[in-house]
Image (cartoon, helix red, strand yellow):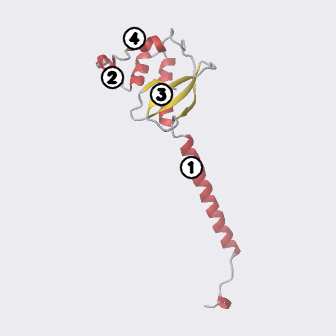
Amino acid sequence: MTLIDAKQYDFARDRRRRIQIISILIVILVLGWLLWSHRNWPEERVVSQFFDALQKQDYETAYGIWMHDPQWKQHPEKYSQYPFNEFRRDWGPGGEWGLIKSHKIYGSATPKGGGSGVVVEVMVNDRAEHARVWVQKSDKTLSFSPY
């Protein structure tokens, strides 16, 4: 085949191919953005469940979520470093946040330089100051944020 015998250039085919490539790139970018923006969703969900339990004044369930052990009552001695009475004092009606009537996950972040957990920021009772809860990535145990 020589240049004289070459096929006629198909503008429509080239346009379809260009649209397909651009569409695939847009889909990849959107999926990448969605995955990136929801990368801490499991940790945010655990914190939301914790505050839901506090809102219902179900402190025993909330403590189980905090310790990541729903069966904590069967072996309370395992949690002697932060016993239930102290937890209730911190998160109950007399605690820093008072009686929790509403909450909203404000955001989450992994500390600079990486880390073993995520800091989840929660707006409690529409206060300007937000609660910060540390969630361990490996087992979803909660604790007070060091940040």
Q: Look at the picture and state if 108 lies above or below 2.
A: above
Q: Label 3's element?
A: strand
Residue at point 63% right, 59% down?
23
Residue at point 68% right, 69% down?
15
On the image, the x and y values in percent for residue 128 come to 64, 20
Q: CA distance from mark 4 to mark 2?
A: 16 Å
Q: CA distance from mark 1 to mark 4?
A: 45 Å
Residue indicated by mark 3: 134
Looking at the picture, tell me which residue is in the foreground, 43 or 52: 43
Q: Look at the picture and state if 90 lies above or below 116.
A: above
Precedes in sequence: disc 1 or disc 2: 1
Extreme-right residue of the structure? 11
Q: Amino acid at mark 4?
A: Asn
Looking at the picture, tell me which residue is in the foreground, 6 or 53: 6
Q: Label 1's element?
A: helix
Residue indicated by mark 2: 71
Q: CA distance from mark 2 to mark 3?
A: 21 Å
Looking at the picture, tell me which residue is in the foreground, 27 or 39: 39
Task: Answer whether labels 1 and 4 touch (C-beta < 8 Å).
Answer: no
Residue indicated by mark 4: 85
Q: Nearer the viewer, mark 2 or mark 3?
A: 3
On the image, the x and y values in percent for residue 129 come to 61, 20
On the image, the x and y values in percent for residue 35 come to 54, 45
Residue indicated by mark 1: 31
Q: Label 2's element?
A: loop
Precedes in sequence: disc 2 or disc 3: 2
